[in-house]
Image (cartoon, rainbow, N blue to C red):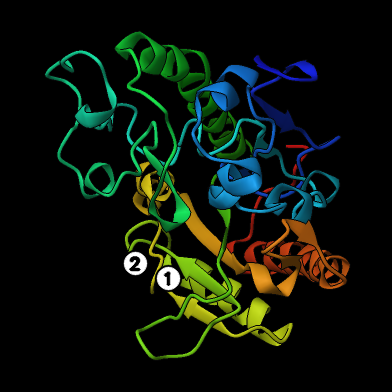
Amino acid sequence: MITTAGGAVPAFEVVEPAEPTIPFVFCSPHSGRDYPADFLAATRLPGDSIRRSEDLFVDQLFECVPRLGAPLIRARFPRAFLDVNREPYELDPQMFSEPLPDYVNVGSVRVTGGLGTIPRIVAENEEIYRKRLSLAEAIGRIEAIYKPFHAAVEERLRRTKERFGMAILVDCHSMPSSVRALPGGRRPDMVLGDRYGTSAGARLVAIATGRLTRLGYDVARNKPYAGGYITERYGRPAIGQHAIQIEINRGLYADERIYRPHAGFEVLAERLAAFVAGFAEDVDADYGLPAAAE
């Protein structure tokens, strides 16, 4: 649980289907918008500036998923508070009032950039905190939220693979509308990341790309987003467990300046529902999956 100005709410939710019918698990780790009251009191950022790291409304874009037969794991805590798309102990020593233990990864590129498990900055390099944190505060967030979140992902993948013989994790994110696939290149509508071919079978990524392209979207692959810790950790195609990250251009569905959906939201949500249903149909046809009741 986290305590917001409006009261206590779950840190994350697992929305289960009435009956699992497709070999997918969907995850939205960065779309949380329930800000703990004590966290807001500790930040130096004014107003909505703290929201610059949110993957705006991505969980709502994929609300179709349980209806289509797969679980949806969605964060309610904000990314600026805790980033579960990192190793459990990627921590920046500049942020803490005491030395960090030896098991902490203080040297990753993500930590150096201020975007560790407990982020130091939001997008546009704005510092989050007024003062240093205690190590106990960080460990508390990791134990109470990070570890249960990943346990939920692991359990849904285990159940899905046990039922269908394979499991496909779709890690759902959004990206600023200004992002280009390559410097000076096009601004894609979506980017699919498979850790450069290591986290998912090539055929699955081709199916997903084809389905999105036929819906009218410009889809890039791995550039500039190849997938983060979640994709890397759970993508094990050799054992039938695949992970694909999807990044969606926020300009398709939201006004990034005021953090509000615009008229394109409903259109995109409907097309994503068609994408999920079509992706599942193609996987079933290609892989000859067992019936869900078996």
Q: Which mark is residue 92?
A: none
Helix, strand or loop at disc 2? loop
Q: Hey, what amino acid is under mark 2? A: Gly
In terms of image quadrants, where is residue 201? Answer: bottom left
Write the residue at 59% across / 27% down. Answer: 40
- Residue at the spot of label 1: 202
Helix, strand or loop at disc 1? helix
As displayed, is residue 69 above or below residue 75? below
Query: Which sits in the foreground, 286 or 185?
Result: 185
Marks 2 and 1: CB-CB under 8 Å?
Answer: yes
In terms of image quadrants, where is residue 182? Answer: bottom left
Position of residue 199 measured from the top left corner of the image (x, y, whole percent): 38, 56
Query: Which sits in the foreground, 151 or 22?
Result: 151
Is the C terminus in the top left, top right, bottom left or bottom right quadrant?
top right
Write the residue at 69% across / 31% down. Answer: 34
Query: Which sits in the foreground, 265 or 162?
Result: 265
Position of residue 92 measured from the top left corner of the image (x, y, whole percent): 25, 32
Write the residue at 64% across / 20% down. Answer: 37
Residue 141 is left or right of residue 274, and the answer is: left
Position of residue 24 measured from the top left corner of the image (x, y, whole percent): 64, 48
Q: Nearer the viewer, mark 2 or mark 1?
A: 2
As displayed, is residue 152 above or below residue 61? above
Write the residue at 70% across / 28% down. Answer: 13
Q: Earlier in the sequence, mark 2 or mark 1?
A: 2
Q: Residue furthest bottom?
A: 185
- Residue at the spot of label 2: 197
Position of residue 186 measured from the top left corner of the image (x, y, whole percent): 48, 89
Q: Hey, what amino acid is under mark 1? A: Ala
Q: Is residue 190 visible?
A: yes
CA–CA distance in space, label 2 to label 1: 7 Å
Query: Which sits in the foreground, 272 or 133?
Result: 133
As displayed, is residue 170 above or below residue 256? above
